[in-house]
Image (spheres, helix red, strand yellow):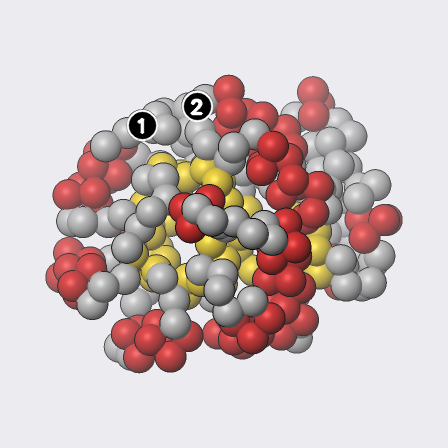
Amino acid sequence: MWPYPTMIAHRGGGTTAPENTIAALDAGLRHGYRAVEFDVMLSRDGIGVVMHDPDFGRTVPGPGTVAGLDAADIARLDAGSWFGPEYAGEPVPLFVPFAEYCKAHGIWMNVEIKPAPGHDEATGRHVADTVRQLFPQESDAARLPLLSSFSATALRAARAAAPELPRAIAFEGLPADWEGQARELGVLSVHVDHRQLAPGQARAVKSAGFGLFCYTVNDPERARTLLGWGVDAICTDRIDLISADFR
Ligand code: G3P
Ligand code: MG
């Protein structure tokens, strides 16, 4: 039901390095993490880039938007200076080389399909097509990336493009019809904000046969509690505080 690692570095390296960068992956590796979550969005020319926000200004200099600029220009933006001067010039990664870096270092991927507004279908299709090309004949299901999204439209497009790839539906709090949505989308797991999860809901997700993933858990005691509820995986910013083999 959950063949993947339990502890997952949020946005590459959590809060130990600039999010969604190669430097973040390196930070994760230094802390012993071999599993990451990161966000993929489409540039104006339809290339996947590893970014969380649709608008520039927080992690790269603004103004501007991911959907309004070509990938080659986005890749030249400085995604490191906001975090610290030692990271100045750290680029925005393109999805393909970023995923190849994960593959080369044995890092399992939870790829969050994060469409810019109005680009749900194209982003879901692009991520699924790209992952399929990166893992053409993977015989070990546990090595395949898990494609998650808050967007049901993106997940449907991902399923149409590559039905064999595992998918996950993300929610903030579980809606009343979470199980219907999960079954309709044919997902392997359900991803929720741990602050909005009650133990009974955790039991319901598990007894319905889905994996259960909680984001973003930065307190070891809370992580222990959630694992005690049967949660399968925990995404954390504090890879410096919660070890990769935490149980
Ligand atoms: O996929 C889990 C988590 O990353 C969802 O929230 O906003 O950090 O992408 P966000
Ligand atoms: Mg995310």
Q: Position of residue 232 (x, y in %)?
A: 27, 47
Residue for point 77% across, 63% down: 46
Ligand 1 is within 8 Å of the C-beta of the residue at disc 2: no
Q: Position of residue 246 (x, y in %)?
A: 28, 29
Q: Is residue 162 left or right of residue 116?
A: left
Report whether residue 83 is seen: no
Label 1 crowding class (10 Å Cα cut-off): few <14, some 14-19, many 20+? Answer: few
Residue for point 35% across, 72% down: 182
Residue assigned mark 2: 32
Rendered view: 161 above or below 43:
below
Q: Position of residue 243 (x, y in %)?
A: 35, 26
Q: Position of residue 20 (x, y in %)?
A: 61, 41
Residue assigned mark 1: 245
Please name the amino acid that badge 1 sits on: Asp
Label 2 crowding class (10 Å Cα cut-off): few <14, some 14-19, many 20+? Answer: some
Rendered view: 47 above or below 177:
above
Please name the amino acid that badge 2 sits on: Gly
Q: Give the CA separation, mark 2 to mark 1.
A: 8 Å
Depth check: give the residue in front, 37 or 127.
Answer: 127
Report whether residue 169 is seen: yes
Q: Secondary structure at mark 1?
A: loop
**Quadrant the N terminus occupies:** bottom left
Disc assigned to residue 81 = none
Lower sequence index among marks 2 and 1? 2
Residue for point 65% across, 40% down: 100
Disc 2, disc 1: CB below 8 Å? yes
Residue for point 20% across, 67% down: 208
Depth check: give the residue in front, 69 or 84.
Answer: 69
Q: Secondary structure at mark 2?
A: loop
**Quadrant the C terminus occupies:** top left
